[in-house]
Image: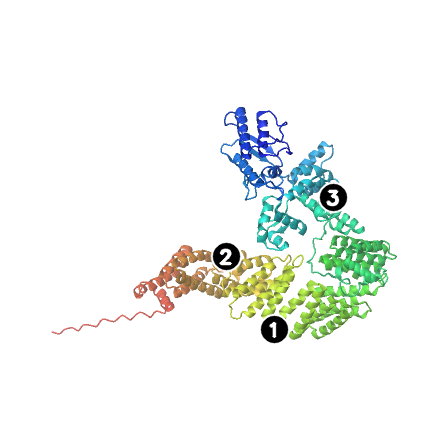
């Protein structure tokens, strides 16, 4: 029986039973109302229960039948009938005890053997999660199945079919999926939100959602009121601070640790208020399950206005093109927060965020004004204010420069204004908008036919592509057109700064191709011209790099000094830090480490003040290398940790630079650990460097060399101390870097790899590695095999002495099959001399174990295993091992030696340093007796 949704007339526990009894008997419960009842609560309940059973007997037979009662809003009823929620001052004396007893009676009724009362209830919160209450875990929770996106799509299409509308198109399908996920698959909400699928207006969507949460406000407030204080506080921290979030991070967010929030967080998960989000793992993230509740909370309690509270929905509801149009519209109106509600629209080929990018930040955060301000037609007196606006209020700056571009008096002014508008968009991390505006500026400049305007537009596109997007193709196309424009026979660009800036970039392009002389020539040609500080500093940087490339270190130091002077004159911290970085390299090349260290440290400080994280990292790396060179391993470790911390803190992290930072750490640690007492920590650091390397998205030659050097270092350490994890790292690196086998750092790798295998007795792991990377075996030398197998034999003997024969046998039985697999993969196994080579290799191992082993039983075990694996091919070695065992087991070995092949016996005597056999005495001749 389904009772009414609202039960305001229920004021006593027994009245619930009386209503159910009325339904069972067929008399109806419409006339039942609250009555003054002077009986004891237990007596009233027992009488109502007896009447219930009598009605059931009359309808179904004695002891037969079951009443299935469907009751909504059961959590609110439990508060009235069975909970203890009176205010402390107004609660009647003993009310908490009486209500607890009522709850115990209800549980007894539901749990009775052969019971006839089943309660199926709906609740907005939890009613059986309080350990102290009798109803604790009295119910089996059943979640109402949410709609999947496909189910919601089927519903929307059926609904449109009934309304005579065509099915949803692909764009509307995407919107329907976004809505379904936003409302958590709630069928009732899906029905209410179906009307916004065709809406192109974000404001309409926001208004519909606001109206919906207004209707649900009482429901959501009741849910909040039912939460324990700590759980409610955690929920507030999750929503206000941003989600998804891990439990550990949430504990830190509220000023504690994970253990401090564990109970309250468990309540939220068991109440199904929060749920896991993303991949299941050790650091599991969580978020609030009901996204519409999150929207309600943000609207009512966090004072979010505009479109920001539904940013999560808008970013998935609209296509990229629609979002871009909305962003552009809101930016044009100066509605910055609403523009950001549609997402950042990052480009797919964006480079790491190093905190400073020339296009976005140069001339705004430091250094001279971008000469683009003057080219835009702005008055000199207004440029400082425009520069500050671009730095501090880029949303307003975007609207300003966008309007100025359309009202410009000349094509050059329009191109410069469009470029500055793109800078404003980029400063808001809206690079898609910046790219669109830059391309539109190039098109407008081409249409105007003004060469200076086109050069200005192309320069902005080149700097944006190379600085913000790491787009080599886009920057190359812009550079090619700029060079063609300057070299054309027709009208030439007149602006000197524009021309010399192209010359500086062309020189930088030659540097990237390592054509040092060409780069120097271009830089010198540009420096002859009269130009502003920006292009001059770019030309000086290019010239210094070209001189370093040609090993003209003295000249490079002079150029760096000039660059530093210009940078200081125009307060450009970036250019001054660049001069310090280049000077450091020149000083190191001329064997001046102390001076190089001082200037590297100064450059790092400048870059840190500027916020140019990449420049800061480069200076720190130079500093770390110098510390290693000066044999200050402790300082190099500290610098390496700083590099790793900054690099992994970038967005996205630069794992390549992080790997370099860890290299500084493990080299510094090794330098301090001359006695080899801390080898384990050194190797852990080297493995961490390779772990960072494995996460680098693109492989370069220089980075492959870094990986090779780290692997070589690791192998040297693994030969000294067992390190099984090195094989996993080696496999990953070899699988990713195809050119590693040719690296000079790995020329001794095959022999070192085999020696590391023997040291760690990692032959099973090595077998898998050898099967994948066959070059390792192809380049292993006979000496490498001999040393590794001798080391293996010694290890078995040591295991026998320290752990006993059984443990040693377990090791041998695992190693020998893997060793056979590796040998069968080796090129030597396919030659005509393969049997001879095999015997030689097995003999190396047998001799080593025979010399060191004290247990003859182990030698016989090894012989049996060899015979089983290699058969007659290993017959000689098997015989020798058994002879070794016999000799070891007998105080008088001669009786055994005399029974074997003389060649084998001679070898055994020599190996075990046994004396030669005693000469046999000749029998004396008898004299013949005369007579």
Question: The N terminus lies in which quarter of the figure?
Answer: top right
Real-space Cα distance between discs 2 and 1?
Answer: 39 Å
The residue located at (80%, 51%) in the rendering is 332
Q: Which residue is mark 3?
A: 206
Q: Which residue is mark 1?
A: 630
User: What secondary structure is marked by label 2?
Assistant: helix
Label 1 Cα crowd, 10 Å radius (few <14 / some 14-19 / many 20+): some
Q: Quadrant of the C terminus?
A: bottom left
Q: Which mark sits nearer the N-terminus, 2 or 3?
A: 3
Task: Give me the C-alpha separation between circle 3 and circle 1.
Answer: 64 Å
> In what element is the residue under mark 1?
loop
Residue situated furthest right in the rendering: 409
Label placed on residue 151: none
Q: Is residue 723 left or right of residue 872?
A: right
Q: Nearer the viewer, residue 564 or 591?
A: 564
- The residue lying toward the viewer, choosing from 163 and 755, is 163
The secondary structure type at the circle numbered 3 is helix
Residue designated by label 2: 765
* Left or right, 386 with reference to 49: right
């Amino acid at each position: 029986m389904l009772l009414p949704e609202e039960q305001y007339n229920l004021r006593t526990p027994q009245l619930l039973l009386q209503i159910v009894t009325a339904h069972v008997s067929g008399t109806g419960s419409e006339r039942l109302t609250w009555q003054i009842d002077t009986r004891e609560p237990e007596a009233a309940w027992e009488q109502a229960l007896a009447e219930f059973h009598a009605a059931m007997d009359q309808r179904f037979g004695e002891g037969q039948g079951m009443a299935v009662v469907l009751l909504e809003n059961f959590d609110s009823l439990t508060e009235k009938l069975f909970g203890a929620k009176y205010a402390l001052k107004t609660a009647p004396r003993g009310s908490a005890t009486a209500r607890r007893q009522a709850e115990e009676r209800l549980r007894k009724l539901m749990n009775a053997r052969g019971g006839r009362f089943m309660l199926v209830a709906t609740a907005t919160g939890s009613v059986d999660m309080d350990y102290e209450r009798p109803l604790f875990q009295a119910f089996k929770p059943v979640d109402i199945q949410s709609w999947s996106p496909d189910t919601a799509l089927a519903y929307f299409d059926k609904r449109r079919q009934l309304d005579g509308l065509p099915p949803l198109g692909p764009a509307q399908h995407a919107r329907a999926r976004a809505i379904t996920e936003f409302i958590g698959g709630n069928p009732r909400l899906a029905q209410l939100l179906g009307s916004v699928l065709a809406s192109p207006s974000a404001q309409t969507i926001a208004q519909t959602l606001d109206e919906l949460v207004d209707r649900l406000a009482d429901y959501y407030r009741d849910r909040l009121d039912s939460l324990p204080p700590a759980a409610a506080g955690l929920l507030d921290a999750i929503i206000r601070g941003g989600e998804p979030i891990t439990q550990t991070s949430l504990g830190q967010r509220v000023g504690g640790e994970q253990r401090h929030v564990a109970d309250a967080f468990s309540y939220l998960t068991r109440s199904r208020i929060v749920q896991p989000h993303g991949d299941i793992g050790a650091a599991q993230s969580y978020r609030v399950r009901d996204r519409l509740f999150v929207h309600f909370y943000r609207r009512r309690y966090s004072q979010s206005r505009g479109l920001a509270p539904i940013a999560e929905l808008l970013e998935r509801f609209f296509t990229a093109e629609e979002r871009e149009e909305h962003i552009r519209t809101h930016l044009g109106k100066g509605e910055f927060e609403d523009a950001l509600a549609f997402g950042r629209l990052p480009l797919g080929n964006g480079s790491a965020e190093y905190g400073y990018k020339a296009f976005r930040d140069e001339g705004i955060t430091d250094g001279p004004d971008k000469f683009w301000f003057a080219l835009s037609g702005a008055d000199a007196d207004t440029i400082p204010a425009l520069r500050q606006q671009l730095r501090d209020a880029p949303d307003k700056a975007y609207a300003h420069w966008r309007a100025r571009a359309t009202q410009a008096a000349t094509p050059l002014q329009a191109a410069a204004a469009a470029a500055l508008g793109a800078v404003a968009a980029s400063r808001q991390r809206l690079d898609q908008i910046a790219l669109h505006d830059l391309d539109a500026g190039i098109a407008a400049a081409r249409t105007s036919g003004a060469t200076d305007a086109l050069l200005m537009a192309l320069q902005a596109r080149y700097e944006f592509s190379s600085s913000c997007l790491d787009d080599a193709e886009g920057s190359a196309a812009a550079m090619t057109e700029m060079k063609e424009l300057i070299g054309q026979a027709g009208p030439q660009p007149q602006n000197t700064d524009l021309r010399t800036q192209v010359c500086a970039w062309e020189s930088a392009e030659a540097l990237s191709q390592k054509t040092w002389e060409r780069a120097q020539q271009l830089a010198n040609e540009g420096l002859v011209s009269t130009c502003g500080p920006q292009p001059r500093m770019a030309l000086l940087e290019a010239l210094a790099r070209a001189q370093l490339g040609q090993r003209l270190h003295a000249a490079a130091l002079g150029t760096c000094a000039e660059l530093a002077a210009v940078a200081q004159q125009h307060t450009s911290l970036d250019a001054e830090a660049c001069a310090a970085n280049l000077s450091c390299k020149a000083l190191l090349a001329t064997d001046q480490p102390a001076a190089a260290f001082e200037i590297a440290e100064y450059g790092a400080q400048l870059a840190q003040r500027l916020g140019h994280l990449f420049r800061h990292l480069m200076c720190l790396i130079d500093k770390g290398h110098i510390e290693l060179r000066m044999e200050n391993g402790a300082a190099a470790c500290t610098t390496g940790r700083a590099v790793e911390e900054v690099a992994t803190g970038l967005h996205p992290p630069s794992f390549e630079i992080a790997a370099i930072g860890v290299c500084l750490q493990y080299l510094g640690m090794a330098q301090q650990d001359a006695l080899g007492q801390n080898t384990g920590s050194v190797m852990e650091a080297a493995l961490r460097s390779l772990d960072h390397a494995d996460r680098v998205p693109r492989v370069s030659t220089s980075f492959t060399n870094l990986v090779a050097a780290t692997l070589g270092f690791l192998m040297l350490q693994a030969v000294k101390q067992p390190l099984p994890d090195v094989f996993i790292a080696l496999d990953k690196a070899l699988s990713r870097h195809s050119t590693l086998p040719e690296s000079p750092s790995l020329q001794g790798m095959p022999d070192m790899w085999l020696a590391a295998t023997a040291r760690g007795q990692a032959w099973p792991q090595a077998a898998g590695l050898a099967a994948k990377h066959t070059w390792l075996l192809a380049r292993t030398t006979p000496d490498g095999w001999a040393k590794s197998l001798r080391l293996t034999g010694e290890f078995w003997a040591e295991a026998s002495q320290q752990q006993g024969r059984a443990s040693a046998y377990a090791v041998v039985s695992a190693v020998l099959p893997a060793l056979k697999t590796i040998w069968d993969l080796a090129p030597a196994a396919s030659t005509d001399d393969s049997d001879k080579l095999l015997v030689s290799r097995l003999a190396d191992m047998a001799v080593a174990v025979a010399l060191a082993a004290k247990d003859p039983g182990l030698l016989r075990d090894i012989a049996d295993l060899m015979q089983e694996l290699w058969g007659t091919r290993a017959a000689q070695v098997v015989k020798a091992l058994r002879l070794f065992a016999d000799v070891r087991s007998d105080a008088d070995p001669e009786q055994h030696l005399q029974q074997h092949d003389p060649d084998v016996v001679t070898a055994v005597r020599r190996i075990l340093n046994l004396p030669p056999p005693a000469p046999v005495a000749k029998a004396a001749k008898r004299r013949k007796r005369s007579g």
